[in-house]
Amino acid sequence: MNLRGLNTLLYKELLRFYKVWLQTLLAPIITALLYFLVFAHALEEHVQVYDGVSYTAFLIPGLIMMSIIQNAFANSSSSLIQSKITGNIVFVLLSPLSYLEFYLAFLLAAMVRGIAVGIGVCVVAVAFVELPVHSVTVLLAFALLGSAVLGSLGIIAGIWAEKFDQLAGFQNFVVLPLSFLSGVFYSIHSLPPFWQGVSHFNPFFYMIDGFRYGFFGVSDVNPWRSLGVTAVSFAVLGAITLFLLKRGYKLRH
Amino acid sequence: MDTAITVNEVRKHYGKVQALQGLNLTIERGEFFGLLGPNGAGKSTLINIIAGLVRADDGRVAVLGHDVVNDYRRARAELGVVPQELVFDPFFTVREVLRIQAGYFGLGKENEAWLDELIDALDLTDKADSNMRSLSGGMKRRVLIAQALVHQPKVLVLDEPTAGVDVELRQTLWQFVRRLHREGMTIVLTTHYLEEAELLCDRIAIIDHGVLIALDSKRALLGKVTGARSRLSVTLAAPLTAVPAALTEMLKQQDGARLEFHLDKHHDSIMAVLDALRAAGGEVVDLQTEEADLEDIFVQLTKRGRP
Ligand SMILES: Nc1ncnc2c1ncn2[C@@H]1O[C@H](COP(=O)(O)OP(=O)(O)O)[C@@H](O)[C@H]1O
Ligand SMILES: [Mg+2]
């Protein structure tokens, strides 16, 4: 293992988003805050999901998790497509870094960015509402696994896309709908049975439901099941990513 | 291990284009090797296969005996590559770029002195802390060369490093690369500036349509053609009304009273040309012959076998 090489690539990836923190950290925190203000204001009086949990409080874990996964995806996918389009990906490809080191560096950077935004959203949100914490371990497990799933998906999308609009398509037609239809703003028990069924095929639903369990100790489905689905999603996407990287798919022509 | 680069039966196609058609090539350690060929010949494809950026369909390539696919870590550690495109990372300064590149090769602080040396040798000192984005094209090219050298490779491959570079920088780069060669580095240079290859390289390969069409020392290559061809310029006192029919085949250019002929020494003679001109009423006032240079070889070889 070329640990120094891996560290360097990770450091470079972290520096890349840190140098433009206004767009990569602050902007998504503000976006989440806006959702929070609008939905909490509009629905607080009308919706009660779990006993003893205000709608405002219910909303926050979902928003944090949504921020984590969207930003993890955005980080690896946009970094890769930019490097591919500008051509500077060659500097990494010319080096002796292995596909595994390449994967770990992009994955960890995506996780750091996702979780950094998540922490930012959390810090701002607790200024408005008091949140209980049922289990820090559960919170961590879902934050790490969720960001890892989307970090991997972002690598796949970044490798596959050849143009920015292809990547935007992936984001708009896959990541956004799945994250919005995952129960961030509602409990799936409030949905008609058909859509409840559909939601069970959405891995994002389990990440958000499980993460919410970490705060309230209540959830729509058993948190173990959520953890299982999230872990399997990570295993599958991680394997696909490693397979593509090993083959040099769209990177080493 | 005396072989710097071994290329064995390498094939690569892109759709219907056969970029490399079973190429064989051996570059020895310590050589200054020129890889020449017209645009689209397959030079960059070959370099990218050596660098591991492109995968060959067939055949194998080794750098200092290390297979570029199976033993890529060691192959890449020995190899520095300056890509043809002027690529850069707009997020970082020159020094950051070099540190990061060295880091990929597993090098850290202990390598800092060498980076300073590179920055100095390539005249980048004033720009070391400037963002890559703010650099001129020539400066970016220098950084690209420095980046290829951060890990002190034994073999350096430069893909058209002087394309679109001004004369002054070209001279600086030549000097620098010569110095590296003197210090023992194997250099592989692709170029389509023939004078560059003529000036720098010991041995030259010419490829066209993915096929090796010549491979020899520079001297032998020049010798081949000088033996066979030469250029004859004749200036007459007054333009001819008509060029003798016997000479039209050899005539390459006519500019008033100045005529330029390309002779094949095996069956054309200078005396015969002059006699024919005199017989047609021409009075020769000046006469020049020129030996062939790489350009002639190049033109001659790459035309051969084309439709
Ligand atoms: N990525 C690619 N996709 C399709 N065709 C390519 C690609 N790269 C090179 N080619 C083709 O392969 C041939 C050799 O190209 P190249 O190696 O770049 O030539 P050179 O460097 O000698 O100018 C050309 O016909 C070129 O169009
Ligand atoms: Mg080329």
Image: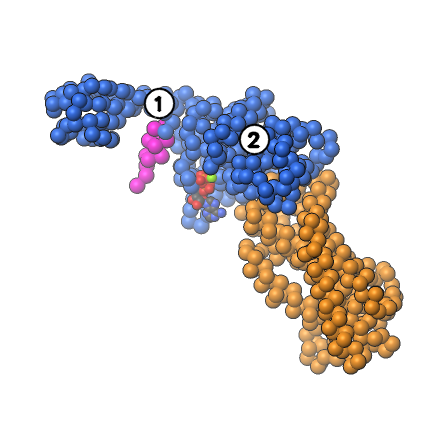
In this rendering, position of residue B5 left or right of residue A24: left
Whether A226 is drawn above or below B158: the answer is below
SS assignment for the magenta stretch, majority: helix
Which mark, residue B224?
Answer: 1
Residue B275 percent location from the top left of the image: 15, 19
Residue B91 percent location from the top left of the image: 64, 46
Whether A26 is drawn above or below A39: the answer is above
Q: Nearer the viewer, residue A85 or B133?
A: B133
Rounded to the nearest angstrom, the CA distance separating label 1 from label 2 is 29 Å
Residue in view at x 61 percent, y 65 percent: A172
B65 falls in the magenta region: no
User: In the rendering, what colour is chain B?
Assistant: blue
Tag 2: amino acid: Leu
Residue A76 percent location from the top left of the image: 66, 54
Tag 1: amino acid: Lys
Give the residue pinned by disc 2.
B156
State which region is magenta: B296-307
